Amino acid sequence: MPTKVIMPKLGESIVEGTVTGWLKQAGDEIEEYDPLLEVETDKVTTEIPSPASGTLLKILVAEGEIVAVGTVLAWIGEPGEEIPDEGVKVTHDHEPHETPDSESITDEPVIQRSAGKDEDLGYISPIVARLAREKKVDLSKVKGTGMDGRITKKDVQNYIKERTGEAEAEVPIWETPADGDLFRPTEMVFAKKGEEPTRVSRAEPSVVPGETISLSPMRKRIAEHMQQSKRTAPHVTTVMESDMSQVARHREIAKQEAGSGVHLTYTAYFLAAIITGLKAVPLANSSWTDAGIRVHQQINLGMAVALSSGGLIVPVIKNADELSLIGLAKKINDLAERARAGKLEPDEVQNGTFTLTNHGTKGSLFATPIINQPQSGILGAGLIQKRPVVVNDAIAIKPMVYLSYSFDHRILDGASADTFLAHVVHALENWQ
Amino acid sequence: MTEITMIEAIRQAMDEELARDGSVFVIGEDVGVRGGVFRATQGLFEKYGEDRVIDSPLAELTIVGVGIGAAVYGKRPICEIQFADFIYPAFNQIVSEAAKMYYRSNGQWSVPLVIRAPYGGGIGGGLYHSQSVEAFFTQVPGLKVVIPSNPYDAKGLLKSAVRDPNPVLFFEPKKGYRLIKGEVPEDDKEYTVPIGPAKVTREGRDLTVFAYGMMHHYALQAADTVANEGIDVEVVDLRTLYPVDRETILESVRKTSKALIVYEANLTGGYGAEIAATIAEWGFMNLDAPVRRLAGPDVPAVPFSHPMEEWFMINPEKIADSIRDLAAF
């Protein structure tokens, strides 16, 4: 009896996910617990292990499709084993990102040949073996024109072209350029499908010469979120500046006390000040719903983390108000590190109620951040720089920072938003 | 754009950098009054004076040692080693000092130094005026190693090298000094070519030839020859050997599935071995043939006797033959 591969529930709040890559193809052998496919939920990619040992009989969900939790994704069993009727695919109510490959399921049994010396066919190169596997080509039917009758890549390409009558229109897999996998360990290169934007050498037809960078799932997700946020929420950005002298002083001492294990950054202070502000103005910790403004009981703070491969992700510190400053710092380090390593759990990017973006790390003074929906606000912290400021009618040099607060004007008005921001500034300037 | 020689491009680069930045100076054997044995520094002594175009003793260790000291002090020296064959006395300075300074001072000191050295055979120079020494240095993180193949890149890369905060070894294919001509922007004093990226200089589908310096020039000629026989060759000019542009290399292999690497240094342990390893390691699943190298034979040096030098040197005919072989595989 074959085994179903089911879309697992990857977290409390996860109801669906995108199948971003199959690590095995139909017909491949697989061991129980071996990685079988990759599923992406809110920019976090998770490997799904195989539930059984055997042969991957049939893949039901193509790469790029969004499926609900509980969907049957594939079947595993003995070669030739029949798949029960319930094996029909159930998908979520979404358009697939890409059309499934019509060739991915074939009725003809094909003898798999691996690269190396083959008794009947001579030397089979890695690319020929790969093409034959991916395109279901029986190599014994291909006429070799290479050295000593070896089957070359071109022979296989020509065979495929004749068999299907397909013109050059389809970009073959070996033409799709590097997927940015280069400087990682080879086992990852072989196991993973590219997340990073790929450089496409074949330019789109356009008047202006240039190259088209194809969209990674993350890029698409960011684009969707940003567009949707700007469409739904009327953004207003208000800016205040804060004197960071007290915080800087406190940080020097606290760093000593905390020891080398904790990397105490300004981010922790910003988050702590935001918590103060949110407690003073609970409306700033809310979401717009059709039923009304939902004020959250928890304070779950997201922090934007830029990824070296491009793109960004917003891990969330749940119940941040229950953590001490050092607790926040530890949590920040942990989440940021794992975010950069691509090791966040799906749950850890969910259910934020407010977001901090630290755009100052690259030198930006102030920004107009876009709200991370369905939250009501986002605070941008600029570069902390020493500036002359007037104190008691004298000019003093102080470490200053601009805080840019973008809020949803459906929920908050200028006065309430500025009250929140003033609390944040007050907390920072009077840090004890 | 005017067409100029490699040597003129290199001279212009130094002239412009000397004019642009007062901390730049040139030091080497005969670079001053005589204008360099290849005339790379001709006119610079007259223009910038003996303090900025310095004739050194015949001591390469000194040339580079002085350069490192000055660079640490904030100057931007361009050290000329008259022939790359003479670089060995300075090897310790380059590898132990220049390459490691930034690392061992934890980023406190850097060595913005350029070492120019003509390399390569095919000029009747014999054992001590023909060597290709790049592989000795591409194994040393902390150095950058650049080899241009045409005037445009030579000028643009040398200017980048002078402005780079790291020690850069700039090897010039001396056979191409006057042989290779090309267009270089005349008025644009600010054009540079970045250190790092390789360049696809000829697009093709059947196989890729990877080369640099003089061999790149020859590879293009060979590619033209075999094009008449229906072999469509892609040519990649590596330009910067360290750090190497793996992405461009692997992208090309992904397309053509066959790779030939050409270098004129000795075959064994030569720089092309690193390119071959890169392709084998990360491009394996795209290969349709073994990765091939065409390089100088494993004998101690380029012979002086002309027929023997011909035997040693890689030329367009030898490259074309290797291309035909690989295409037929």
Image (cartoon, rainbow, N blue to C red):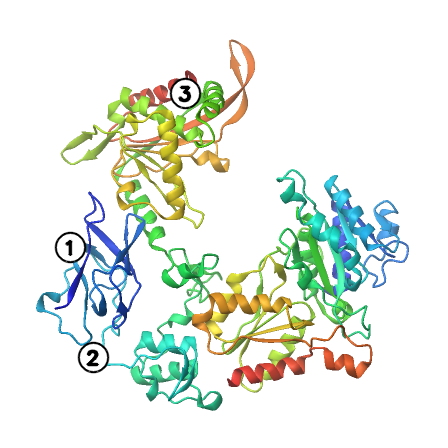
| Residue A158 lies in quadrant | bottom left
Residue B227 appears in the figure: no
Q: What percent of the width, then of the height, locates residue A334?
A: 38, 38
Location of residue A381 by image quarter: top left
Tag 2 and tag 3, C-beta contact below 8 Å: no
Q: Mark 1 points at which residue?
A: A70
Name the residue that disc number 3 marks. A428
Amino acid under disc 1 = Gly
Q: Residues within 10 Å of mark 2 (few under 14, many from 20)?
A: few
Q: Alpha-carbon neighbours of circle 1 within 10 Å: few (<14), some, or many (≥20)? A: some
Task: Answer above or below: position of B228 versus B220.
Answer: below
Residue positioned 61% across, 80% down in the render: B224
* Residue kind at label 3, given as amino acid type: Leu
Q: Which of marks 2 and 3 is nearer the N terminus?
A: 2
Mark pair 1, 2: CA separation: 27 Å
Tell me the SS state at disc 2: loop
Give the numbered dot on residue B9.
Answer: none
Name the residue tied to disc 2: A107
Residues at discs 2 and 3 both on one chain: yes
Q: Is mark 1 on a helix, strand or loop?
A: loop
Locate residue B30, reporting x and y percent.
Answer: 88, 57
Q: Is residue A107 visible?
A: yes
- Say which chain tag 1 marks: A
Dots 3, 1 in contact, CB < 8 A = no
